[in-house]
Amino acid sequence: MSNSESNARTMVGKVVSDKMDKTIVVMIERSVKHPKYGKIMKRRTKLHAHDENQVCKIGNIVKIRESRPLSKTKSWVLVEVIS
């Protein structure tokens, strides 16, 4: 089981919502280059993650990892609070 956990995707992002019970919304920012014009643009993705102990607050930087689907929109789990 530890082998499959090491292969799971991990992301670092900022908590933008903690209003739900045991769930946080994490915003991931990434930079992409426009295919035709070459401009570097910021793209944002919001992911729902499971926070079992409800330790996260809005503005925290967190690390999350992919897991099995826990609900309709939630398939990520909180690994650690970075700051």
Image (spheres, rainbow, N blue to C red):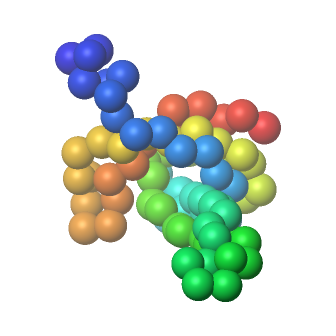
Q: In this orientation, does residue 1 appear?
A: yes
Q: Residue at x 25, y 60 (%)?
A: 71
Q: Residue 36 in the image: state x and y as whole percent.
A: 59, 84
Q: Position of residue 18 (x, y in %)?
A: 60, 60
Quadrant of residue 6 within the rendered picture: top left
The image shows residue 17 at horizontal and vertical percentages of 62, 66
The quarter of the rendered structure image containing the N terminus is top left
Left or right: where 55 falls relative to 9: right
Q: Residue visible at 23% across and 45% down?
A: 68
Tag count: 0
Q: Is residue 15 visible?
A: no
Q: Residue 59 is drawn in which quadrant?
A: bottom right
- Judge from the rendering whether residue 6 lies leftward or rightward of residue 24; answer left or right: left
8 relative to 33 in the view: left or right: left
x, y percentage for residue 3?
26, 16
In the image, 71 versus 66, the foreground residue is: 66
Q: Residue at the location (23% across, 53% down)?
A: 69
Say which quadrant the C terminus sits in. top right
